[in-house]
Image: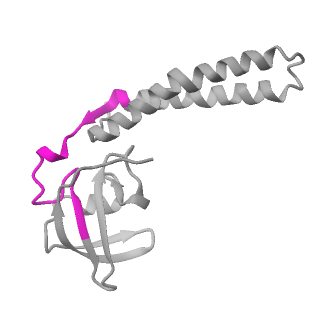
Amino acid sequence: MEKEPMTNAGYEKITGDLDFLKNTERPETVIALDEARQLGDLKENAEYHAAKEKLAIIDAQIAELGAIISKAVIIDPATLPHDKVAFGSTIDLVNVDTDEEFTYTIVGGVEANADKGMISFNSPLAKQLLGKEEGDEINATLPGGAKTFEVLDVYYKEIVIND
C-alpha cells in the first residue's frame, strides 16, 4: 500500500477538514436537499439539483480524505537530523544566475502550497534537494526551464499550515 507521509500539522488539518465535512457540511446539505424535495416538481427544481450536486461533491471529498488518512504516515521532522535536506527541512536557496533567494520547506503532498513555500517531497525540486547540504549546487529542471541553485542553509523550523 502506498504511504502518504505528512507532518502532524498536515494530519490535523485533513482530519479537521473531514470532521467538518461529515459533521457540519453534509448534514446541512442533506437538510437543504430534503427541504428542496418538498418544493414539488423535481425536474424544474434548481434548489434540489444544486443540493444533490453539492452532496455528491461532499461525498467524493469525504471519500478522498478518508483514503488519504488511511495511508497517512505521520513524520515529526523535529526528530530528524537536518544537516542534509530531509522531509520537513527548510532550505534557503540562491539562484546562481540571478542571485534571487528562495526558501522552501519540504512537506507531504496534502500540505504542499507553493505560494507559501511548502513543496511536496514528490515535487521535481524537492526530489533533487533531498540529501543535499549547505554549499551544494543543484541543476534543477523546472517548468520554467533549467536553473542552478546553491543551497545556502538547511534547517528545521516548526511547520504551520494556514488556510
Q: Quadrant location of residue 58?
A: top right
Task: Tell me what residue is drawn at x 42 percent, y 75 percent.
Answer: 145
Residue 135 rendering spot, x and y as whole percentages = 14, 74
Q: Quadrant of residue 56?
A: top right
Which residue: 63% across, 22% down?
A: 28
* Colouring of the image: one colour
Decide: is 92 above or below 37.
below
Query: Which image quarter holds the N terminus?
Result: top left
Q: Please state the horizontal and vertical placement of residue 64, each as a whole percent of the image.
A: 48, 31
Q: Residue at x 23, y 64 (%)?
A: 91
Q: Residue 42 in magenta? A: no
Part of the protein shown in magenta: 69-92
Q: Is residue 28 above or below residue 128?
A: above
Q: Find residue 156 and report its horizontal and vertical position in percent.
A: 18, 55
151 relative to 111 in the view: left or right? left
* Position of residue 113 in the picture relative to residue 77 (left or right): right
Q: Residue at x 75, y 30 (%)?
A: 50
State whether residue 29 is above or below residue 115: above
Q: Is residue 91 magenta?
A: yes
Q: Is residue 63 above or below residue 163?
A: above
x and y percentages locating residue 149 in the rendered image: 27, 75
